[in-house]
Image (cartoon, helix red, strand yellow):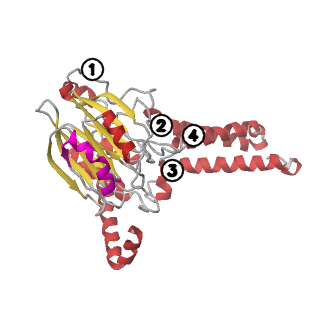
Amino acid sequence: MPDFDSLPLWLTLLHGLTAILALAALVATLLPLLRQTAWWIRVFDFPRLQIVGVLLVVILGGLALGWAELPGYYGLGLLLTLAAAVVYQGFRIVPYTPLVKKQVGDSTLKDGKRHLSLAMMNVLQFNKQGKRALQVLQKVDPDIIMAVETDEWWYQQLKPLEETHPYTCHEPLDNTYGLLFFSRLKLENCEIKYLLDDDVPSLHTRVQLADGRTWVQVYGLHPKPPAPAESKTSTKRDAELLLVGKAIDQKDEPTIVFGDMNDVAWSHTSELFRRISGLLDPRVGRGLLPTFHADYSLLRWPLDHVFVSPHFKVDDMERLPYVGSDHFPIYIKLSYEPHDKEEQEENCEEADAGDHEEAVEKIQEGFEEEDEEETDEAANPGEKKELTT
């Protein structure tokens, strides 16, 4: 170790700060490896790009400070450990870059009647830029639209969409989990369901393509995030996603799952969901398209997702302009190409017995946690009232 007594104070402080950042970045890398659901562990699933940035800065700082030449190889060992962390984080991120093969192929279909476009928008309930959000949606003009965090005020702002999208299924709420759904295409069996939380709705419907023959099963989700003000664990978020995944696994039909999942594409749960459901992620091989946080360019990750069955290919996918929310909306145009389904199935990630067992356990834990919360709320009704006012 360097003789800190002989170093200028500023250089000693620089060594200390760099060492603290190194420890923090390594802890942030290792914590997500734990299969614990506590919010303060799961939150480190999100900022992998940011952690890589800190790791690289620390490595450069360590090299500049001469850590590689320190006696006892302690400095060199730390630098190599930091480099290994960069490689690991990069391994988790690289599938969501153009460096790998696309999991969902590019469309070559010209038949517009077998295309389906959709937009997902988290409006941020307390955002009052309703006209701006409406203009963005009207300009891109997707076939189906889901807007979440929508209360009655937001319903009135977006109601003009019903002129062009007459098929609707709404559940406006004032608890930041309201949901509005607009469709230009015919719907069948459109339902709002509460899968786990009694205050978190989800959308379940079938959508008929413009060809008048093809029906697509669509799920719209917005589970609670693992955060101290929302949910102390990721248990119910994970369970809700896996409940839908298990339902899809029992069917073989064109399927789309989209929404603000409050989870990143590279998390263990998202990957488990893909294996259980057999769905594909259009982001793989295309790019991150980070949608949150819209106000901070250095603190962004992909929270709003679209997963599709192998029946579909991608015609277009993009992040839409800022609408005053903490999320950017996301847009995708898909083409129904069942003739390439078998080829696309080769890109599906297959679930093994352990995956199915883990999914069942997580779902059971989700229901148990909800039962415990309902029992607590019944025993202390004043606490819930205070939190929701």
Question: Is disc 3 placed on a helix, strand or loop?
Answer: helix
Residue 221 in sight = yes
Asked if the residues shown at circle 4 and circle 2 are in contact, with their CB atoms under 8 angstroms apart, the answer is yes
Question: Residue 74, relative to residue 178: is it above or below?
Answer: above
Question: Residue 202, relative to residue 376: is it above or below?
Answer: above
- Comparing 194 with 103, the one in front is 194
Q: Earlier in the sequence, mark 3 or mark 4?
A: 3
What's the distance in space between the residues labelled 3 and 4, CA to CA?
12 Å
Instruction: Write the start and end of the magenta stretch as one range.
Output: 149-168
Three-letter code, disc 2:
Ile
Q: Nearer the viewer, mark 1 or mark 2?
A: 1
Residue 285: give x, y in percent of width and height: 40, 29
Q: Quadrant of residue 195?
A: bottom left
What's the distance in space between the residues labelled 1 and 2, CA to CA?
28 Å
Quadrant where the C terminus is found in the figure? bottom left
Label at residue 52: 4
What's the distance in space between the residues labelled 2 and 3, CA to CA?
14 Å
163 is within the stretch colored magenta: yes
86 is within the stretch colored magenta: no
Label at residue 93: 2
Question: Residue 49, relative to residue 317: is it above or below?
Answer: below
Would you name the residue on which mark 3 appears? 44
Is 372 on the left or on the right of 169, as rendered? right
Q: Quadrant of residue 59?
A: top right
Three-letter code, disc 1:
Thr
